[in-house]
Amino acid sequence: MIPLKDENPTEIFPSVTIGLIVINVLIFLLQIAQGPESQHLILRLGVIPYEITHFTDIRPTAAIPVPLTLFSSMFMHGGFLHLGGNMLYLWIFGNNIEDSMGHIKFIFFYLICGLLASFSHILLEPGSQVPMIGASGAISGVLGAYILLYPRAQVITLVPIFFFIRIMRLPAVLFLGIWFLMQLLSSGGGVAWYAHIGGFIAGFALIFLFSKKGKRRFRTLKKRLTSS
């Protein structure tokens, strides 16, 4: 399934969401401008679980202090599809989350979700020496927040059905629920699935700290659970 847009208007201009997209695109263009050296750059700026868990820096040495790779890795991507997919999700779902909490809070929310997503991967793959890059962990946090705040929002989705492709309107709770289930059932393929799962849970759990609407949604959810 590929989301095309959501039918969920915003009240403020999503300057942070657009800014994050621009930064990610510019950094990716800098990556590909390096040519064959771009892989070397990923090794130096991607987050490597072994380096974090062993407080060391394996060759090639990082271009910045190792802990800061937890941040630099969020803005690097492995290819056009990797970048395009992440930026599509950020554009569709990020503007509403930014709208719910304001520009400054959204920056902190995004970065914290990205950090917690990385730690989820590191916790479950502590000895891995494969660099992890991409904004998907932070964006997964955005999705976790969205499913709580706007479960009934309609997501216009491209859905392949055998040899046919249909455009359907799906409620966000269904679209994002399927997305999360796919992360749970997936493994391998060079994708940090644990980071996606951890980021999603982080966003779902933290939204009440950043958004008044999140607090109200949590109270409503709590009442429903206690009354059932």
Image (tube, rainbow, N blue to C red):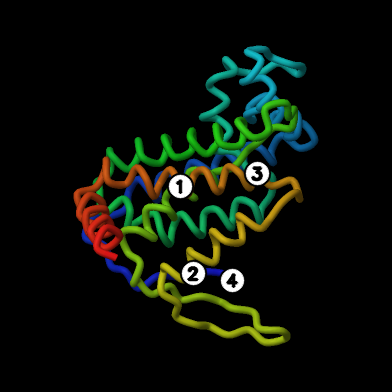
- Residue at mark 3 to residue at mark 1: CA–CA distance: 15 Å
Mark 4 and mark 2 lie on one chain; the one further toward the N terminus is 4
For image coordinates 46% across by 71% down, the residue present is: 174
Q: Earlier in the sequence, mark 4 or mark 3?
A: 4
Instruction: Look at the picture and state if 67 lies above or below 113.
Output: above
- Which numbered disc, 1 or 4, marks the residue closer to the eye? 1
Residue placed furthest toward the right: 36
Residue 73 percent coordinates (x, y): 58, 33
Mark with earlier residue (3, 1): 3
Dot 4, how many residues are within 10 Å of its Cα: few (below 14), some (14-19), or many (20+)? some
Q: Is residue 7 above or below residue 51?
A: below
Which-is-in-front pick, marks 1 and 2?
A: 1
> Closer to us: mark 4 or mark 2?
2
Q: Residue at x 27, y 41 (%)?
A: 209
Earlier-in-chain disc, 1 versus 2: 2
Q: Amino acid at mark 2?
A: Phe
Helix, strand or loop at mark 1: helix
The answer to whether mark 4 and mark 2 are in CB contact below 8 A is yes
Residue, disc 2: 175
Q: Which residue is mark 1?
A: 201
Q: As rendered, which of 152 and 63 lies closer to the eye?
A: 152
Work out whether 49 lies above or below 66.
below
Whole-number angstrom distance, CA of label 4 to CA of label 3: 19 Å
Left or right, 203 with reference to 161: left
* Residue 79 in the image, given as x and y percentages of width and height: 69, 49
CA separation in Å, label 4 and label 2: 8 Å
Q: Which residue is mark 3?
A: 192
- Cα separation, mark 3 vs mark 2, equals 21 Å
Residue 1 badge: 4
Quick one: quadrant of the C terminus?
Answer: bottom left
